[in-house]
Image (spheres, rainbow, N blue to C red):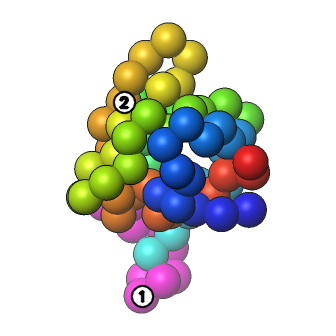
């Protein structure tokens, strides 16, 4: 498993883990993390989905998920684990 943000252009991966949801300092659900998780899922990034890295440079990456092209911030992509 590697972070989605480390795939090279043209590489494919399957999402196996999304590391949002719990706030370490509070010991429970963090509303900001919950909103981020919902947003990621609304974009179609769910466990089991296959993704293709289209471009990976700078602070934004471009992915193909199903028939959609999705731009994602690198900091978010580093919290999504994929299997090549």
> Which residues are the magenta region?
24-35
User: Furthest-top residue in view?
Assistant: 67
- Label 2 sits on a secondary structure element that is strand
Residue located 36% across and 30% down the image:
70
Kindly identify which residue carries mark 1.
Answer: 25
Q: Residue furthest bottom?
A: 25
Would you say 73 lies left or right of 6 here?
left
> Alpha-carbon distance for marks 2 and 1?
31 Å
Residue 56 at x, y = what percent? 38, 49
Q: In the structure shown, which secondary structural element does the residue marked by tag 1 occupy?
A: loop
- Is residue 61 in sight in this rendering? yes
Residue 69 lies in what quarter of the image? Answer: top left
Residue 37 - label: none
Can you tell which quarter of the image residue 49 is in? top right
* 33 left or right of 65 in image: left
Q: Residue under label 2, please give it.
A: 70
Q: Nearer the viewer, mark 2 or mark 1?
A: 2
Does the stretch in magenta take in 79? no
């Amino acid at each position: 498993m590697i972070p989605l943000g480390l795939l090279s252009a043209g590489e494919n991966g399957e999402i196996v883990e999304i590391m949002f949801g719990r706030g370490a300092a509070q010991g429970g659900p963090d509303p900001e993390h919950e909103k981020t998780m919902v947003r990621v899922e609304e974009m179609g990034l769910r466990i089991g989905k296959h993704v293709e890295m289209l471009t990976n440079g700078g602070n934004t990456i471009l992915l193909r998920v199903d028939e959609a092209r999705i731009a994602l911030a690198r900091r978010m992509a580093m919290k999504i684990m994929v299997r090549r």
